[in-house]
Amino acid sequence: TNPSGGTTNLGQKTYQGYPMFFPYPTSMVGVHQVTTRNITRNQTPPNITFNVVPAITYYTPGQYNLSIPAGRTVEITLIGGGAGGGGSIHNYSSSNYWVSNLGADGKDSKIAINANQNLSTTALVAGGGKGGIGANWGNGSSYSNGSAGEAGVVSGSNTAFTIISSVNGIKPPIESRWTRQVGGTTVAPEVEATNNGAGGAGAWGVGDEQWSYGGGGGSGAKLIARFTNNQPTNVELTLTVGDFGAGWKKTAVTNGNNGDDGVPGYGIVEYV
């Protein structure tokens, strides 16, 4: 069965002189296993069974079930979601001075073995970054400045997995108020910018001389782990890919400058 729907005949192949048709485009062919039997020229061709498993698959935010065949090894890359930048609120009255100015946290990315499979279910986690802290401007003698969100952190321990690489995210610096406060830099620069878990920039300061700036959001952590299925049957894993944290956004009662959204996380599963 073609996973993309239907079947596509991409050309005739042969097996010991017998014609075969392989219904997958080249881009979908991963690792395949072939069941064969010895036959002679005068016998009816046997059924040839293909168990096609994509060699590498990419996952955007969401939750997915992975079924790992017996004896197979997968390498799983997790990138946590980047956090949103803090806002800069221009307060017109003391009644809303302490309205939240925070960017939202990025969501965690994680991998776990499903229950009832005689294996530990403890998840490995590439944590999302933490939201940037914003600021409030009342006047030149009543204001605050923001600060950076914390980095995402790798956590969890499970002996069924072998850790290949573990990198925490980055807490961004606080720089001059005359430049916008950046979000945490990605720790996965090899991944395209739309899903690398970078943090969102903080808001420009809404106050005089750009005081009351918002802090940038922290970037998500990155974890690479391998899992080998030593069980006699398939083992089911649950992969969760974390989404971005939103930057603070102004409302009718909390006018000011917005923080930027963080960047979503990512998941990569490769058969090795």
Image (cartoon, grey):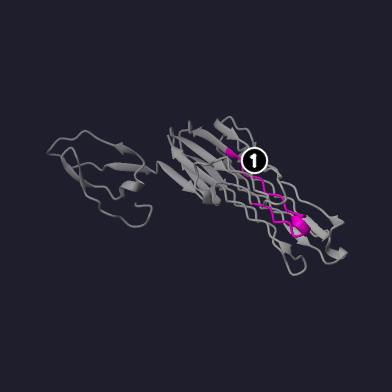
- For this rendering, which residue is in front, 73 or 86? 86
Position of 173 compared to 25: left or right?
A: right
What is the span of residues highlighted in magenta in the rendered image?
201-222
Q: Is residue 213 magenta?
A: yes
Residue type at mark 1 is Ile
Measured as percent of width and height from the top left, residue 258 is found at 68, 60
- For this rendering, which residue is in front, 237 or 135? 135
Measured as percent of width and height from the top left, residue 98 is found at 83, 58
> Which residue position is annotated with label 1?
170
- For this rendering, which residue is in front, 190 or 243? 190
Which quarter of the figure has residue 128?
top right
Position of 167 compared to 18: left or right?
A: right
Position of 72 compared to 136: left or right?
A: left
Determine if residue 50 is in view. Answer: yes
Q: Residues within 10 Å of mark 1 (few under 14, many from 20)?
A: many
Q: Is residue 79 magenta?
A: no
Classified by dominant secondary structure, the portion drawn in magenta counts as loop
251 in relation to 172, above or below: below
43 in relation to 265, above or below: above
The residue drawn where x is 30% and y is 38% is 34
